[in-house]
Image: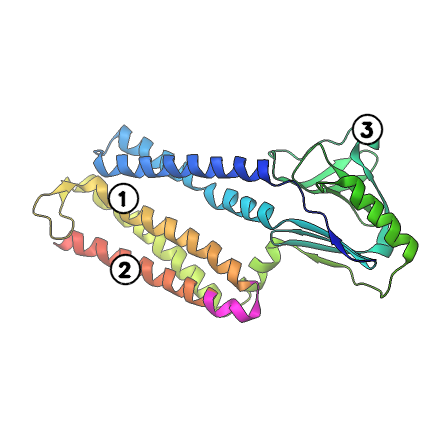
Amino acid sequence: MKSGHFPPPKRTGLIVHSAILIVLTIITIIGFINLSNAQVGPIFLISLLVSIIAFIPIPLFAYRAYSLWRADYFIDRDSLAIHWGLRVEDIPLNDIEWIRPADDLTNPLKLPPFTFTGGYLGIIRHPDLSAVEFLASDSKKLLLVATAKRIFVISPDDPSALAQTFARATELGSLAPAEAKSVYPSFVFTQAWSNNLVRYFWLVTLLLNIGLFIWASLIIPSTAQVTLGQATESVPSSQLIIFPAASLLLSIAGWVAGLYFYRWERERVLAFIIWGSGALTNLLFLLAVLFVVTS
């Protein structure tokens, strides 16, 4: 029997996530544009809060979109593999007790909270099944995979085909014993944090960002006008908030990009370069504020 893959439905989920990302990005950009033109006061504070609140979920939705784009289910005579972003679950076929549609349950299966089309992720408790972990994109095509430790909920585009392939693979028997494997996104973070150099880069970046925000917040109320670069005309000091805001945005983007490359041993040098460059960029933002203040 040949191995096969049964990817989940992706189109609708990718459209939804892309739309959310576009809206959040537009709100963030508009907020920062208003920041550069607003005087210190309610409008300035509202624009700052809106920009930060709109930006914070962007990395999360970007990761969810990436996870859905790369999501797939693989099955052969030895194992069933579930890939969902950084989450990987490799289940030996001998460990699978049964596979059946979610509609067969007497008690309906509740979806994880704060989820929607394209990303039904998380662990819930079911009165009949105990712990249930969702790795699915379509609530209408849910398939239950039961093991001794946990029930997994997946959503292949063709649930019946996957179930039939599992039945045939079980009849044929395993060619070689497969090892169970579970990889969680938090594993990459923990592994990176255990490295002294990585920890140094992260802490330096964090402290520089905090210091930049504190410094800018002290300068803005006490200084009415500042001169940016070689401009002859002064601008409201509230525009200084652009420096810590841009520094923070770049730091978050660099942190996520570094984690992406840190997953592979051969690509880790890129992660070190990104995190090191991020710390250097934060220092340059700090020096830029110093230049503006002294000039």
Res 260 visible: yes
Pinpoint residue 42: horizontal percent, then vertical percent: 28, 28
- How crowded pointer 3 is (Cα within 10 Å; few <14, some 14-19, many 20+) is rated as few
* Residue located beneath label 2 in the image: 284
Residue 147 in view in this figure: no
Q: Which residues are magenta?
A: 263-270
Q: Are marks 1 and 3 in contact (CB under 8 Å)?
A: no
Labelled disc at residue 274: none
* Mark 3 in CB contact with mark 2 (< 8 angstroms): no
Q: Nearer the viewer, residue 62 or 182?
A: 62
Residue found at x 33% / y 57% = 282
Task: Please tell me whether residue 196 is drawn above or below residue 281 in the rendered image.
Answer: below
Local crowd size for mark 2, using a 10 Å CA cut-off: few (<14), some (14–19), many (≥20): some
Within 10 angstroms of label 1, few (less than 14), some, or many (20 or more) residues? Answer: many
Is 124 a magenta residue?
A: no
Check disc 1 and report the residue beneath it. 241
Determine the residue positioned at 47% across, 57% down. Answer: 257
Residue furthest front as drawn: 2
| Mark 1 or mark 3, whichever is nearer to me | 3
Residue at 58 percent across and 59 percent down: it is 188
Q: CA distance from mark 1 to mark 3?
A: 53 Å
Q: Earlier in the sequence, mark 1 or mark 2?
A: 1
- The residue beneath circle 3 is 107
**Earlier along the polypeptide chain: callout 1 or callout 3?**
3
Q: Looking at this rendering, what residue extends furthest in the left direction?
A: 232
